[in-house]
Amino acid sequence: MKVLVIGGGAREHAIVFALKKGGAKIYSVMKNENPGIKRASEEFLIHDENDAEKIADYARRKNIELAIIGPEAPEQHGVANALLEKGIKVASPTKEAAEIETNKEFMRWLMDKYRIKGSVKSKAFDDVSMAKEFIEMLDGEVAIKPIGLTGGKGVKVAGDHFNSIEEAVEYAKEVIEKGIGGMHRVLIEEKVVGEEFTLQAFCDGQAVYPMPAVQDHKRLLPDDKGPNTGGMGSYSHKSGILPFMSIDDYEIATNILQKIVDALRNEGREYRGVIYGQFMLTADGPKVIEINARFGDPEAMNVLPLLKNNFVEMCDAMANGDLTNSCIDFEAKSTVCKYVVPSGYGINPKEGIEIEVDEDSIKKENALLFYASVNEKDGKIYTTRSRSLAIVGIADEIEDAEKICEAGLKHVRGDVFIRHDIGKKELIEKRIKHMKMLRGE
Ligand code: AMP
Ligand code: GLY
């Protein structure tokens, strides 16, 4: 089957890897020349990933049968809609269904309207003085969010990014006045405390089929310090849940995703594709932090290599709106993924510098390599301002997966930065302790 993949990051490289394993002929559209995707593709187009008409024309010309969209921005720009109009099947949501991610106010509104448990107190404002009143009512214990997309970097949280009501109001004002996230409006949410986890699920418009839970690390620096990033790395456990959560928590989160999909269908926005829940596990159970309309990056790299089913068939079934006969199965293994980013990433990244990647040695360590936002010129790899590549280790235990990941990372050289603490025992034990403390155990 001819499958078109939109996006040129490590998540899309992982998608391509899984599709290729399933026998697909890959075509890609990406804005950077990802060496991994390039080599796996029959053909690729370097172009704006948000240009719906051009992508749909390209797909039509190449007789593409099925498409999958990696990032959220092309979904918002109606790439799925344009492909569907040309009669091409798409394993990703339309822009109307993807609003569950692209409009944070809509997400909270939908959860409130359908009384879906696991939401938090929230309100959106375009007036600073009213936003201030709400912030005061919540004693400054808030998260301040642009309504639209900001590449994971627009949210600020009390205690992490500001320390007073005045600073909170200042940021709310900035979001409104500058139109951060594309709207002169801000969402204020009650801050919740706990441990975060990601639950991704396949969805055919009707039912959700959950994947193993993953924990991402959004903060730039070791020990969860520094600014938020697109994600610095992630891990998962062979049990399918994480060391600080229970099966009940996993089931509650799955149920929340199911109710959201039901609500979307009821609103005439049938959701087909992978759906992603970012949850905070609190003393009071899982709370929704955000819903994404796609695989997570890096979380796709934790789950896709473990998928036992043929991923092409899974995508086809999602696009056809019928996953009912798919018995979805993952290998019972633990995974650790760490991103390599250019020095200065998140503040002032070093762009256009060469990094040396010894692919053969990485393979010999049994680690997986997924290229992200780099460019390949004359056989050499150069950084951009975004994340460069990710290395994944897979083993029975997290500890061994982490060692494989680190062994792979030794074969990447250059002026780069890595959060080496991800997947290490100390950090995971800290999470378990934190959760026990919150639960009063
Ligand atoms: P988002 O872009 O919505 O995922 O937010 C980025 C990060 O901010 C999340 O991963 C959380 O760590 C944090 N965050 C977002 N919303 C809240 C909230 N209501 N309470 C506490 N932390 C939050
Ligand atoms: N890992 C966070 C995201 O994909 O949004």
Image: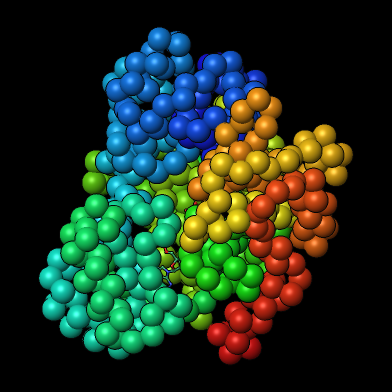
Q: Nearer the viewer, residue 320 or 407?
A: 407
- Mark yes or no: residue 186 visible: no
In the rendered image, residue 272, in percent from the top left (x then y), is placed at: 40, 37
Residue 344 relative to residue 97: left or right: right
Residue 62 vertical placement versus 393 (above, below): above
Q: Nearer the viewer, residue 340 or 193?
A: 340
Q: Nearer the viewer, residue 62 or 279?
A: 62
Q: How is the image coloured?
A: rainbow
In the rendered image, residue 27, in percent from the top left (x then y), is placed at: 52, 20
Residue 226 relative to residue 50: left or right: right
Residue 233 vertical placement versus 141 (above, below): above
Residue 207 relative to residue 211: left or right: left
Q: Quadrant of ligand 1?
A: bottom left
| Residue at the right extreme, as displayed | 364
Question: In which quadrant of the rendered view does residue 243 lie?
Answer: bottom right
Residue 172 relative to residue 18: left or right: left
- Residue depicted at 14% across the width and 77% down the height: 130
In the rendered image, residue 138, in percent from the top left (x then y), is placed at: 29, 85
The quadrant in which the N terminus is found is top right
- Residue depicted at 80% across the width and 51% down the height: 410
- Residue depicted at 68% across the width and 43% down the height: 355
Question: In which quadrant of the rendered view does residue 389 lie?
Answer: top right
The quadrant in which the C terminus is found is bottom right
In the rendered image, residue 141, in percent from the top left (x then y), is placed at: 35, 83
- Residue depicted at 59% across the width and 68% down the height: 221
Residue 150 vertical placement versus 355 (above, below): below
